Every structure is written in structure tokens, then in C-alpha cells.
Amino acid sequence: GDSVTQMEGPVTLSEEAFLTINCTYTATGYPSLFWYVQYPGEGLQLLLKATKADDKGSNKGFEATYRKETTSFHLEKGSVQVSDSAVYFCALSVWGNKLVFGAGTILRVKS
Amino acid sequence: EAGVAQSPRYKIIEKRQSVAFWCNPISGHATLYWYQQILGQGPKLLIQFQNNGVVDDSQLPKDRFSAERLKGVDSTLKIQPAKLEDSAVYLCASSLGGTDRGGYTFGSGTRLTVV
């Protein structure tokens, strides 16, 4: 079946450090890929998405590139801020169907 | 546009009691999803509706969970009787469905605590 594997956390960084959160997937069809973010006490928000191979999704300084050859969609940010502290979920959907989520990665940014 | 509305926001019940959650999706969204998010885990799909028909309920514990979407708009998820392991956040999401590749909107969720 379809599944998403993302790196375990928590990831703890200092402000202005470079962030990478790894995500790989297995899908029975051609998936769309997503990163969602959940800030403390809030609901899930779409951070970025990519719908085909080599597409780059970007938002708020975060980027992720759809790599079909390595079945990956790693999240990156060049300089993190304390306000980026949250839980990040990688997810996929096939043919616009249900979202399948990874387990989530906690990011803690220290000032 | 208005978002996905869910109520209640929080609920505390004793085990073996029953509970119901309500969701009103974005107007015009044909597909509605209920997810269960246990603390420290990613959301897991419980049931997916297309209009008022069930598309996927393979992960729904049918001996205690039920859901309906009678008029193809709002939906109710019920647990009866609740167990301690049902403590989680229950998320409702909606989308246009079909070939819409990524237009999902989530509600704020209902946090259920079973004691």
C-alpha cells in the first residue's frame, strides 16, 4: 500500500541554521506530495505541495523538490526562526484521493 | 471562504460512554474525510465520503465507530462505547475530490480524552 517515511525527531536547531527533514514514499500510482505543518495548539496547515516529478514546492522560505528517481520529497529551509517550531508532516495522495501521512517530525528552534 | 467547521473543540468522557463529533465542510466540496490523530503520530484516515456515499472505511473500527453524511454536506462521527485508546484528535477535512490534486482543507479538530 501507499506509505510515507520521514526522519524521526525531535530536530533541534539554533536560529538561522539550515534545516533538512527527510521524507521518502511508496505509492501504487503517481502521487502528489505535500508538507503540512502543525503549530502548537493549532490545526494542520498546508505548507507546500508538488504534483509531478521535478516540481519544486515553496512557501515561507521552505522548499521541497519531487524526486521520482529517489522517491523523496525532502523539506529544506536556509535559515530557520524560532517561529518555525512546529510538527512537520510529509504526505501523499494518489489521484486526488485520501492523504497518507508520515509520523511527523518535531522541529524545535532555539534563539 | 469559510473553512471546515468542527465541534465540539474538546470533549472528555468516561470509557464505555458514547460521543459524537460534527463536521461541516467547505461549501461545494464533494469529498469529506475523517482522520484520527493519536498523540505523537500522523493522522490516520478513518473514513472517506464522496457526496453521501462511503468510498473508503477500511480503517474504521466498525464495532464501535460509525459515521454518516446523509445529505452529502455535513457529517457526524460517533464512538460507542469509547475506549481509553480512542483518546486522540479527530480531524475532518474536505476537498473537491476527483482529479483535484491537493485542495484539501482541514478543520481545527476535536480533542477527545477518554478517562
Image (cartoon, coloured by chain):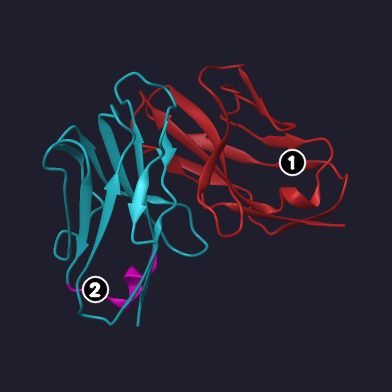
Chain colours: A red, B cyan
> How far is mark 1 from mark 2, CA to CA?
39 Å
Residue at x-position 74% and y-position 41%: A20
For mark 1, name the chain: A
Q: In front: mark 1 or mark 2?
A: 2
* Residue type at numbered disc 1: Thr
When the figure is inspected, residue B111 is found, relative to residue A2, above or below; the finding is below
Q: How many marks?
A: 2
Q: Are marks 1 and 2 on the same chain?
A: no
Disc 2 crowd rating (10 Å Cα; few below 14, some 14-19, many 20+) is many
Residue at x-position 54% and y-position 54%: A42
Q: Is residue B103 magenta?
A: no
Residue pointed to by mark 2 = B82
Residue at x-position 61% and y-position 58%: A40
* Residue type at numbered disc 2: Ala
* Res. A20 mark: 1
For mark 2, name the chain: B
Residue B85, position as x, y percentages in the image: 34, 72
Residue A90, position as x, y percentages in the image: 55, 41
Q: Element under label 1?
A: strand
Residue B5, position as x, y percentages in the image: 36, 47
Frontmost residue, B3 versus B92: B3
Residue B88, position as x, y percentages in the image: 40, 65
Residue stretch rendered in magenta on the structure = B81-88
Looking at the image, can residue B3 be seen?
yes
For the N terminus of chain A, give its image quadrant: top left
For the C terminus of chain A, give its image quadrant: bottom right
Disc 1 crowd rating (10 Å Cα; few below 14, some 14-19, many 20+) is some
